[in-house]
Image (cartoon, rainbow, N blue to C red):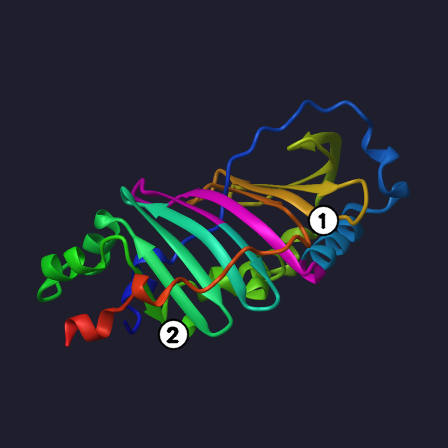
């Protein structure tokens, strides 16, 4: 399917989660380590995990909201959903095999303007569409290290942060790290204070594409299996 899906699902990561109230003083967590040290250790621990679930929502310029919910590991297994522009699609990757099962709106958006779109949309309803992972448009989400690269792509963004109070993210205690950029954008990172210092949540406010990202299910098995052959179609053969 070449890169037709890539244009349809390239998204910024983000998510929404309920966050509890603070209370504990920040200097009681991490034994007095500096915010920069905590942030660096959090990014390393997060990227070193064998698997992670990434749930996100982000507001794109123009008002379109996109969302993802992916569980991905370092063994090329991935399962999740993505939403945007009134559409929804499920995604699976097992090794070098990737599959997308979208609703009618998803395929209409994806194939818009291409010959025979309506007929193709009918034929893919309820089916998994097979694709090369490198061409499916999901490589930034179903590749664990690529999906987490945003945490480490610009190390300067996690330097100069300040400690806030401790709080909870989905019932897990976390330390708040905050930073305000010159352009008015505020970056907030929530770092687990118990066990490994995983990033539990990351928030961007005040920028062009405000977003929230919640990370959970660290090191848990990703439930991803190839769909039955009868449920799989090849989009290129349909278009042939």
In this view, 149 is above or below 220? below
For label 2, the crowd category at 10 Å Cα-Cα, with few meaning under 14, some 14 to 19 and many 20 or more, is: some
In this view, 134 is above or below 209? below
- Residue 61 in the magenta stretch? The answer is yes
Please tell me which residue is depicted at 51% across the width and 35% down the height of the picture.
16
In the rendered structure, find residue 180 and report the number of the disc placed on it.
none
Name the side, left or right, on which 43 lies relative to 136: right
Given residues 167 and 130, the one toward you in this image is 130
Please tell me which residue is depicted at 58% across the width and 56% down the height of the picture.
222
Identify the secondary structure beneath mark 2: loop
Q: Position of residue 141 (x, y in %)?
A: 48, 59
Q: Position of residue 120 (x, y in %)?
A: 15, 62
Please tell me which residue is depicted at 72% across the width and 49% down the height of the picture.
198
User: Picture quarter containing residue 233?
Assistant: bottom left
Q: Which residues are magenta?
A: 47-69
In this view, 204 is above or below 159? above
Given residues 71 and 23, the one toward you in this image is 71
For label 1, the crowd category at 10 Å Cα-Cα, with few meaning under 14, some 14 to 19 and many 20 or more, is: many
User: Picture quarter containing residue 77?
Assistant: bottom right
Which residue position holds label 2? 132
- Quadrant occupied by the N terminus: bottom left
Which residue position holds label 1? 198
Identify the secondary structure beneath mark 1: loop
In this view, 237 is above or below 6? below
- Residue 160 in the magenta stretch? The answer is no
| Mark 1–mark 2 CB contact (< 8 Å) | no
Q: Marks 1/2: CA distance?
A: 31 Å
Examine the residues drawn in magenta and state their main secondary structure: strand
């Amino acid at each position: 399917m070449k890169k037709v899906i890539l244009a349809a699902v390239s998204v910024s990561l983000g998510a929404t989660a309920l966050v509890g109230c603070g209370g504990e003083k920040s200097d009681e967590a991490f034994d007095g380590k500096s915010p920069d040290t905590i942030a660096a250790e959090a990014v390393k621990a997060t990227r070193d995990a064998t698997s992670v679930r990434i749930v996100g929502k982000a507001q794109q310029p123009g008002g379109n909201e996109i969302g993802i919910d992916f569980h991905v590991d370092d063994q090329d297994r991935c399962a999740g959903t993505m939403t945007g522009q009134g559409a929804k699609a499920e995604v699976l990757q097992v090794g070098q095999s990737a599959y997308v099962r979208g609703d009618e709106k998803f395929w209409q958006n994806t194939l818009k303007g291409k010959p025979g779109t309506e007929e193709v949309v009918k034929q893919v309803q309820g089916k998994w569409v097979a694709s090369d992972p490198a061409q499916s448009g999901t490589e930034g989400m179903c590749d664990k290290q690529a999906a987490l690269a945003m945490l480490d792509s610009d190390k300067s963004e996690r330097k100069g942060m300040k400690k806030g109070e401790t709080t909870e993210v989905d019932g897990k205690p976390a330390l708040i790290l905050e930073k305000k950029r010159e352009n008015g954008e505020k970056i907030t990172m929530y770092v687990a204070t118990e066990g490994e210092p995983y990033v539990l949540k990351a928030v961007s406010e005040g920028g062009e594409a405000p977003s929230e990202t919640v990370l959970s299910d660290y090191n848990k098995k990703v439930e991803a299996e190839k769909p039955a052959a009868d449920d799989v179609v090849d989009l290129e053969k349909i278009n042939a």
